Image: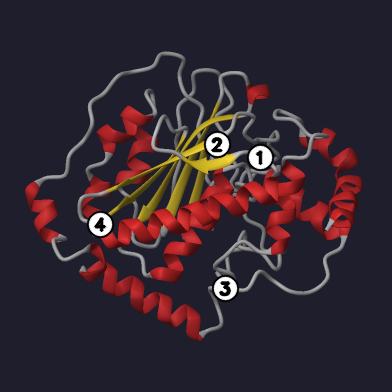
Amino acid sequence: MKLTCNTPRKGALAHIVSTLTAIAVVVALPAAAQTVTRSTTSAADLAATAQGPDRSQLGVYYRQLEQRLVSQGNLRQDRGAGALDAATLARNFMAIAMRTEYGSGMSGSGSAAPLRRWEQPIRIGVRFGASVPAAQQRSDQAALTRVAQRLQRASGHPVGLTNGAANFHVLVLSDAERANAGPILQQMVPGLSRNATRAVTRMGRNTFCMVIAIPAADPNQGIARAIAIVRAEHPPLMRQSCMEEELAQGMGLSNDSPAARPSIFNDDEEFGVLTRHDELLLRMLYDDSLRPGMSPGSVNQHIGQLAQAVLARG
């Protein structure tokens, strides 16, 4: 499950996160930026995860959870089979791309939201906690490269990893490292609110991963920056699921829908990878006929026609 928080008032700060499976947060920042220093992990924290975070108690918990999910037929690695129709795609697009998950006060079914996507190329920078072994870092880099390539093919929007200036940060951190990550989050996103920072540093174990998307000051310019958090303790399938889902959500598909199938944007954990359905939603989101800031009403007027066109292109 994901939580999308919109704070539309100018100067408003990010807020509101609950303990969920996965979280997508859309954050509005104040105009004034801040400069902060890079955080470091204490020697005690590193000692606690010296053999790798997957050997920790939390790592054992997630391995057992993954095994249980797989035994129940979840975390599927296929991309979904069966025919898709334009009406279903259009309906799911409106539910996933054009709504927040919760209403005010963290209750209800959320509310309609303007279209959110990137206009600038997405440059993904990956940062690992010191607890993550070198071999795991190489594996994660390769996996994220493949996910970025898939997202670029699906959306038609430039997406790739970079060793230079990133605007989409992926942090792979152990529980101890994440709990002390406040300063580095502030460095990456000056002005990030205290509540948004706490959403990361105080993640409960039932929050598998998280993405925070920060819109540009001008809503018509789309998303400006994003930060995704992946738990270093995750076993392979849950790790892959977090990478695929959070990067796609950070591109603008930020909500869940129980009616969306076959899809990773569903609370039931059936799929652990983006499906063809999800890739078609990304293609629709980045179609030239849409633009950031469009109202749900404007999008809804021709989303059915767009869904038909996307399906026809295959």
The label shown at residue 157 is 1
Mark 3 neighbour density, 10 Å: few (under 14) some (14–19) many (20 or more): some
Are the residues at dot 2 and dot 1 in contact (C-beta closer than 8 Å)? yes
Are the residues at dot 1 and dot 4 in contact (C-beta closer than 8 Å)? no
Q: Earlier in the sequence, mark 4 or mark 3?
A: 3
> What amino acid type is highlighted by mark number 2?
Ile
Label 4 – label 3 distance at C-alpha: 25 Å
Q: Earlier in the sequence, mark 2 or mark 4?
A: 2
Front position among marks 1 and 3:
1
- The residue under label 2 is 122
Is any atom of residue 255 visible in this view?
no
Q: Earlier in the sequence, mark 1 or mark 4?
A: 4
- Residue located 54% across and 68% down the image: 272
Are the residues at dot 1 and dot 3 in contact (C-beta closer than 8 Å)? no
Q: Earlier in the sequence, mark 2 or mark 3?
A: 3
Residue 121: where, in percent of width, then height? 58, 33
